[in-house]
Image (cartoon, rainbow, N blue to C red):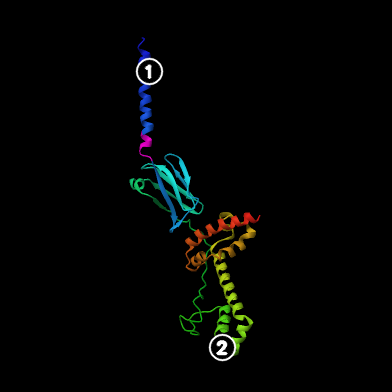
Amino acid sequence: MKSLPVKTNNTFIFFLILLVQVVSGQGVDSKRIHGKISFVSIAVEGVNILNLTTERSTASDKEGLFFLFVKEGDILVFSAVNLVTLRRRVSKLDLSAEIVQFQMIVESIDLKEVVVDKNTQISAENLGIIPFGQKKYTAAERKYYTATSGGGIDGLLNAISGRKAMLKKEVAVEYKEQMLVKLDYLFLAEYYTETLNIPEEYIRGFQYYCVEDSDLVASLNSRNKTLSQFLIITLAKKYNKIISNEN
């Protein structure tokens, strides 16, 4: 009967050693990876990264970089506002890579229904009024062209009065108004207030702020809606900081 405590102690020690081995074994294959998150070659800041296996998490910095302990087979989840949630299983290649690249995409935008009128093909070109392919000028551009191309007294008077400079500014203003129309078409008012957190009274001011950005204007002209949405998110963060500093 006296030998029972010894047997009990041996059993306890055996399970204790087994537990230590299991716990130690879990960390043997773990490695801290260096990752970078990007969207169309642009670094993405503030993306939340969660290791579902270990429940450890972190976030990407302004360069899109992050560090996280993982092992082969772990499931990583990447999430951020306006980005499609990404799930990725860690592979052997990920563990050996110097920097692991993760590409994310922007969520699609629900646009208003567009009704195309059957008479939209009627134009000055189709009617034979002007040749096909001829450059079309807006009203402001036509005025500026007349002022800059005219010679003699008209050219001299325009130079003295500063009318050329005034008309050039008019062309720039008209161009920005065209960009504002594109923004109105692409994004609803609710998108500014609910998604971008822009106060309703600041929406127009934010739109003027946006059309000053050459990258966003280029994306609008190329009709790249995905890139426009990504760029406007970045601009919204900067604009909200400006508003908060003013208040």
Quadrant where the C terminus sits is bottom right
Residue 190 at what x, y percent from top left?
58, 57
Please state if 102 lies on the left or on the right of 177 as rendered.
Answer: left
Choose between 11 and 192: the one closer to the eye. 11
Magenta region: which residues? 25-30
Residue at the disc numbered 1: 9
Q: Residue at image x 56%, y 88%? A: 151
Residue 104 visible to an observer of this rendering: no
Task: List the single residue furthest toward the front.
Answer: 160
- From the viewer's side, name the closer residue of 159 and 30: 159
Answer above or below: position of 125 versus 183.
below
Give residue 191's position: percent from left, percent from top.
56, 57
**Label 2 SS:** loop
Q: Residue furthest top?
A: 1
Read off the residue under disc 2: 151
Dividing the picture into quadrants, the one containing residue 166 is bottom right
Identify the residue at the far bottom of this view: 152
Q: Residue 205: horizontal and vertical position, in percent?
A: 62, 63
Query: The residue under label 1 is which amino acid type?
Result: Asn
Q: How far apart are marks 2 and 1 (CA)?
A: 109 Å
Residue 124 part of the magenta-drawn span = no
The residue positioned 59% from the left and 75% from the top of the image is 169
Say above or below: 99 vs 222: above
Secondary element under disc 1, as helix, strand or loop, is: helix
Residue at the (55%, 68%) spot, across then down: 179
Residue 74, image x, y percentages? 39, 42
Q: Residues within 10 Å of mark 1 (few under 14, many from 20)?
A: few
The residue depicted at 50 percent of the width and 58 percent of the height is 230
Label 2 vs label 1, nearer the camera: 2
